[in-house]
Image: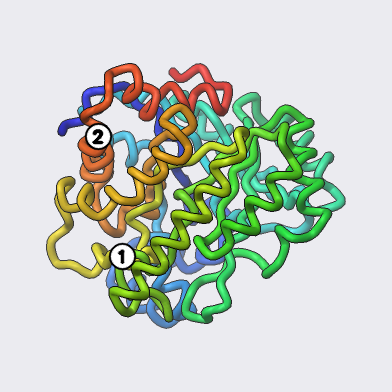
Amino acid sequence: MPLDLPVLDAHVHFWDPRSTPRAVSTVGRLLRWHPRLMRAVGARLFPRSARRFVGSPELVMRAYLPAEQAAEQAGVDVRGVVHIQAGWEGKGPLAAVDETRWIESLGVDRIVGIVGHAAVDGAALPEVLAAHRAASARFVGVRDMTAHDPDRGVMDFSAPGRMERAAFRRGVAAVGEAGLTFDAWCYGPQLGALADALREAPATRVVLCHVGTPIGVGGPFGKHGHTAAARASILARWKDDLARVAALPNVHAKLSGLAMPVLGFGFHERATPPTAGELADRFGPLVEHALAVFGPSRCFFASNFPMDKVSASWRAVFDAYASLVAGLDEPTRRGLFHDHAARFYGLTPA
């Protein structure tokens, strides 16, 4: 079903190796005119787990800026996008605020919200939140990634056990007390720990990114999902643990990130990109369960571009999502693609 609704794309990442300090910026800046060499260097430079996670190192070494995404979204009524922190590096806890300043400096009206990085278990959290706010009126919340898996074939974004610590739980509560939102992201096996942590911050508006990323649910990834029985077990555990998170009324779910290689669908390895129909077939069980346990009013779709771009086009991803909810009434569909995200982040899209 073609996408015939207004869209607020509530999860995008922008960067430019010429001006954003990230782990791969130097190589990306030096080799931006040499795609073949960039691919060859990326294959050697990246740890294996990182190469597998992104699917193509070139994806994160080249720039991704609003003009490119706007071209990808041509023909769709995109009212605005929300930039989510994207691996900005620097010294000291306040360094992450420079990413908010950089996004603000782009002067792009279609970026209607900024979710920056803050270590919620850090002693400098109040200062970091205040500095983000001073840097941009579009700053709406923070993301502190806790994705970790003991399998060395799966890329880590955090030290293990952070969500179990009192400082982390106090920090999530403090984000809410400051009137800001919290974007949570972990892997599927960590959802139970996330539910326990968020139970102690009932006043914080939280959204779970990428419905908890069940590693290997669609096929082999690292040590996960190598048999049909293993994949069935992954899906069953994810369903149970997602329901635990959904039982917390202040938590929402981003229906996003389902084309990332870590889920194991293998779209990025194909010679021909998947159609929207193929994506819908594979995403369907995950989207349907998330809608069932959270309810449509606490869900919204987002692209996770360019990270999902390694598997499919922006239009194919959103057409897949549109087809999965084609049977719902127009106000509900409009909520899923626009209104719920605007309400959650407190936005007035362009």
Give the residue at mark 2.
Answer: 322
Above or below — where is 193 with respect to 264?
above
Q: Residue furthest right?
A: 123
Q: Marks 1/2: CA distance?
A: 21 Å
Seen in the picture, residue 84 relative to 43 is either above or below; the reply is: above
Q: Residues within 10 Å of mark 1 (few under 14, many from 20)?
A: many
Q: Quadrant of the N terminus?
A: top left
Tag 1 secondary structure? loop
Q: What x and y, as percent, mark residue 332?
A: 35, 22
Give me the residue at 22% from left, 28% from top: 327
Q: Which residue is mark 1?
A: 218
Q: Quadrant of residue 315?
A: top left
Residue 304 image offset from top left, x and y in percent: 41, 47
Neighbourhood count class around disc 2 (C-alpha, 10 Å): few under 14, some 14–19, many 20 upward: many
Q: Position of residue 7 (x, y in %)?
A: 35, 27
Q: Is residue 18 left or right of residue 171?
A: left
The three-letter amino acid code for the residue at tag 2 is Ala
